Image (tube, rainbow, N blue to C red):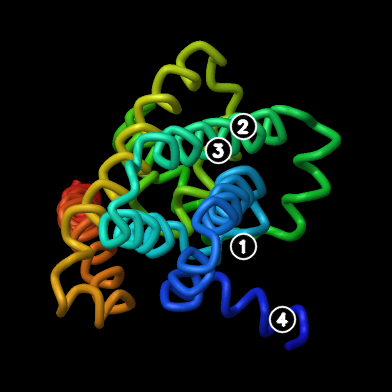
């Protein structure tokens, strides 16, 4: 198995479940690193944080392992990741290099969320793939006060990792859920994005009419 195939396997919920079954501590450590990379580096918006959090919780529930340590580790990884991403955005040297490798549409999308929701975007974005990776970078880019960012970062990290991992823990024992982890992850993402997307469309229509 080459490195690309290994990466694809580890970021797939079913592949992750296999690793967790062999060594749940190693599997959790891998997810912690992936969560940190997704939230900490603006060039990795494609990493599947939602599905991996849910799959981790599902395995822990099925195996009867107390999830507290894993959840705390995942929360810390998410908070630290966003903090690194924010600091990168504030650094003129680093952000100028990375901006060339970031999709401009993603930056504009993040800026639109800030315009609409203000600092609360830091929390909201946790539940939106791609946006959650770009938002802390844009927060640093716009020189958001560090104290404000830290407050919302902590809340967002706790809610995101805590809710998805806990949901997996309690729902993973359901046979259909266990057999369809990928589709369950897709449903979670859609349900997370839908209310915000509806509000965003309504806001855009209001601006056009104005």
C-alpha gap between disc 4 and disc 1? 22 Å
| Residue 125: quadrant of the picture | top left
Q: Which residue is mark 3?
A: 77
Going from the N terminus, do you reach mark 2 or mark 3 first?
3
Q: Nearer the viewer, mark 2 or mark 3?
A: 3
Q: Earlier in the sequence, mark 2 or mark 1?
A: 2
The residue positioned 63% from the left and 59% from the top of the image is: 44
Q: CA distance from mark 2 to mark 1?
A: 17 Å
Q: Percent from the top left, x then y, of residue 39?
A: 56, 46
Q: Quadrant of the N terminus?
A: bottom right
Pinpoint residue 40: horizontal percent, then vertical percent.
63, 43
Q: Are marks 4 and 1 in contact (CB under 8 Å)?
A: no
Quarter residue 115 falls in: top left
Residue at image location 25% in from the left, 53% down from the top: 169
Task: Using residue 117 as the reference point, say whether residue 30 is left or right of it.
Answer: right
Give left or right: position of 189 versus 114: left
Q: 75 or 146, which lies in front?
A: 75
Q: Are marks 2 and 1 in contact (CB under 8 Å)?
A: no
Separation of marks 4 and 2 at Cα, in angstroms: 28 Å
Residue drawn at the location 20% of the way across and 48% of the way down: 203
Q: Which residue is mark 4?
A: 4
Report crowding for label 1: few under 14, some 14 to 19, many 20 or more residues within 10 A (C-alpha): few
Q: Quadrant of residue 191?
A: bottom left
Quick check: 27 left or right of 156? right
Looking at the image, residue 84 lies above or below residue 28: above
Question: Residue 119, position in %: x, y?
Answer: 38, 26
Q: Earlier in the sequence, mark 4 or mark 2?
A: 4
Going 81% across and 39% down the picture, which residue do you hit? 94
Question: Are discs 4 and 2 less than 8 Å apart at CB?
Answer: no
Alpha carbon distance from label 2 to label 3:
14 Å
């Amino acid at each position: 198995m080459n490195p690309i195939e290994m990466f694809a396997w580890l970021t797939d919920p079913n592949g992750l479940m296999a690793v967790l079954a062999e060594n749940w501590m190693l599997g959790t450590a891998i997810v912690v690193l992936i969560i940190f990379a997704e939230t900490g580096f603006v060039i990795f918006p494609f990493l599947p944080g939602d599905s991996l959090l849910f799959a981790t919780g599902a395995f822990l529930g099925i195996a009867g392992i107390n999830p507290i340590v894993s959840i705390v580790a995942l929360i810390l990884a998410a908070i630290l990741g966003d903090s690194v991403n924010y600091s990168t955005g504030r650094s003129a040297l680093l952000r100028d290099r990375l901006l060339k490798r970031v999709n401009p549409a993603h930056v504009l999308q993040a800026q639109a969320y800030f315009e609409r929701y203000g600092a609360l975007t830091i929390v909201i974005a946790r539940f939106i793939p791609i946006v959650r990776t770009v938002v802390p970078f844009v927060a640093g880019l716009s020189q958001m006060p560090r104290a404000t960012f830290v407050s919302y970062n902590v809340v967002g990290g706790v809610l995101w990792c805590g809710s998805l991992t806990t949901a997996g823990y309690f729902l993973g024992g359901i046979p259909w859920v266990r057999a369809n982890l990928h589709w369950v992850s897709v449903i979670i993402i859609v349900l997370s994005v839908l209310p915000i997307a509806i509000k965003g469309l309504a806001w855009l229509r209001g601006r056009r009419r104005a």
